[in-house]
Amino acid sequence: MSTIMVLNGPNLNLLGTREPATYGYETLADVEVMCREAALSLGHEVECHQSNHEGVLIDLIHEAGRRIKAGEVLGVVFNPGAYTHTSVALHDAIKGAEVPVIEVHISNVHAREAFRHHSYISPAAAGIVVGMGVQGYVLGIQGLVHKLKA
């Protein structure tokens, strides 16, 4: 049974209390339970990580790349939060480590402020789920598994 890594970037530890009109009332713990259930239904395990620090996320992506090559990890479902719009380093980490990533955003970033419309992650991602609420994580897991079986 291979593992799917679910990575969450800055401020996602505040899910459930931060701007619930935008992000909903589900907590990060709720999201992690949903992810584990979704992955298990597809024959996989989930390993969840959240960090407010770009370097930690880069290290986790590098680790995912090593573990993919070792056959331990299938890929990554990644909500980079605000780093989406600022981090060339995360883009380069994904490309450099050759990690299949599904980029997930809870809100529809394209219907929000103009600065949220550009993603440095999207060009490196295998797929993107945007605006589906926390259900987007489940869709991301399903999409990752489907894409890598194809």
Image (cartoon, rainbow, N blue to C red):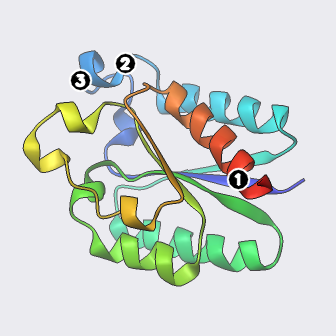
Rounded to the nearest angstrom, the CA distance separating label 1 from label 2 is 24 Å
Seen from the viewer's position, the closer of residues 147 and 9 is: 147
The residue at 37%/62% (across/down) is 121
Kindly indicate whether the residue at mark 2 contacts the one at mark 3 (C-beta within 8 angstroms): no
Residue at far front of view? 150
Give the residue pinned by disc 3.
19
The type of residue carrying mark 1 is Ile
Image point (59%, 70%), residue name: 99
Seen as rendered, the residue at the extreme left is: 114
Look at mark 2 in the image and give the residue it sits on: 24
102 is higher (above) or lower (below) than 63: above
Instruction: Give x and y (percent) for residue 61.
Output: 54, 70
Where is residue 140, by image quadrant? top right
Distance between the alpha carbons at the discs numbered 3 and 2:
7 Å
The answer to whether 91 appears left or right of 142 in the picture is left
Alpha carbon separation for disc pair 3 and 1: 28 Å
Residue that label 1 marks: 4
Q: Could you tell me residue 46's position as x and y percent?
A: 72, 46
Q: Residue at x 73, y 72 (%)?
A: 68
